[in-house]
Amino acid sequence: MAELREPGPHIVDVLRMADATGRPAVQPRCGVGGHREMLRLLEELSTTGADVLTVTIDSHTRLRQYATAQRLLCDSPGDLNGYPLVAHGWRRGRELRARVPHPLQVRHGSPDARDLFAIALASGITSFEGGGIDYNLPYSKDIPLRTTLGSWRRIDAVCGVLAKDGVLVDRELFGTLSAVLMPPSISLAITLLEAAAAAREGVRCVSPAYPQSGEMHQDIAALRAIRVLGQRYLGPDIEVFPVLHEFMGPFPRTPQYANFLIMYGGLTARLGRASKVVSKTAKEGYGIPDAAANTEGILNTILGTSDLLDFVRVDEDRIAEEESWILQEVGELVEPLFSAEDLLGGVVEAFQTGRLDIPFSASVHAHSDVVPARDRGGAVRYADPGALPFSSATRSRHARQLSARAGAANRTTSLIERITRDINYFLDKERTVLPAIDERPLP
């Protein structure tokens, strides 16, 4: 088992150090098809101040289309939108790990990642993202939840065996889901259920990830709630490391405003006491980020997480109130399932009835009846909670929060127009701050 230990700092050590210092670890996304190109990219990013690096997997490998990935790797690796780790094999995976002084994480989006997980482990990579809900419903059209939950249960069972031998695999859970206008309580409920399922298989290290909505008080409250939920529902033996994904909606078009948003994400992660923040780049709005763009994004995120911004003050009473409501909402979603004997079966049934749901899902196995909307301050609320089992107090609060925003403009616009406006939140902010933006050509 010792061979699975990473050279240099272990991922868990990095996350523990982040918690001890109060500065979140910073991680970029990166992945290209060719092996030499991937080595060069990782080596370049290893000098930027990032704490964790990424091996982002290509879409063919994610879907277990290994022959297609192998053919493209041989004929035109530049056409791959990530690194085909299965096609490259574990020896090349170990070379990636050995060439940089930082731990690596595999990010992918695969509903069935058993083969990929095996190659990642053999490569010495012990941070693996995904779960049976979060890597199914946002990405796949018609894969039954029972199938993906079963596949990920096997992955978690291997992690449990390794944990008994002292090898901790960090299991990051993709709470960003469909990524835009995600109500915090849905994100946290899904990752909590996946974390609980993993813990029952022996996993001892989980990193629930939350997507930045853009309203700082709500985002800080959601991040702080993750640790409370871990203590409340997972128990003291499970290490819980909150992760923030910087804003994943439509990104500003000007480098200046994009870089501001990136720094804002770093600051939100620090104030929310996140263990890690996954950075974005100024090219998100119009192209594929290269090493230079990733470097700039990392540095802007680091600025946001630094103590240079310790003078920033937020309304702690407002955050505490928001956190209290988030904890109540998550409890209303998950507690009926935790009381059931069969947790995974209960999750499947809950999605069938709509008692669990996510907005804007690609899957026929989610109702997508939940309609989110921003309130006057920009926080994401439930305009329509669908069949989610919320109390009357929870439903009334969301109605009140949204009624304060309602007015003539809302009465004359369609629901689609309002949702689109809320999704384009930072594009509208950009036009307000930089009014000449509409006159500028895209970079």
Image (cartoon, grey):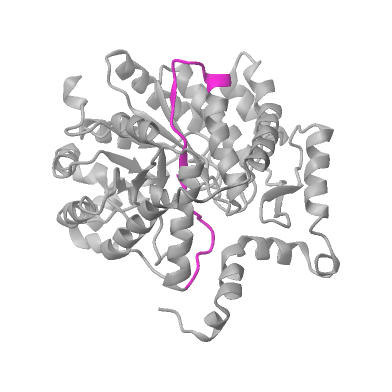
Q: Quadrant of residue 318?
A: top right
**Residue range corresponding to the magenta coloring:** 231-253
Locate the C terminus by quadrant.
Answer: bottom left
- Quarter of the figure that contains the N terminus: top left
The secondary structure making up most of the magenta span is loop
Q: Quadrant of residue 255?
A: bottom left
Asked if one can make out residue 144 in the rendered structure from this viewpoint, the answer is no
- Counting from the top left corner in percent of width and height, residue 16 is at 35, 29
- Percent position (x, y) of residue 75? 20, 61
Taking the magenta stretch, the answer to whether it contains residue 376 is no
Q: Is-magenta flag for residue 235?
A: yes
Residue plotted at (66% across, 56% down): 378
Residue 86's quadrant in the figure? top left
- For residue 156, above or below residue 25: above
**Looking at the image, which residue sits at the far front?**
311
**Residue 426: where, in percent of width, then height?**
57, 64
Which residue does the image show at 20% across and 45% down from the upper left? 88
Q: Is residue 328 above or below residue 186?
A: above
Q: Is residue 384 above or below residue 171?
A: below
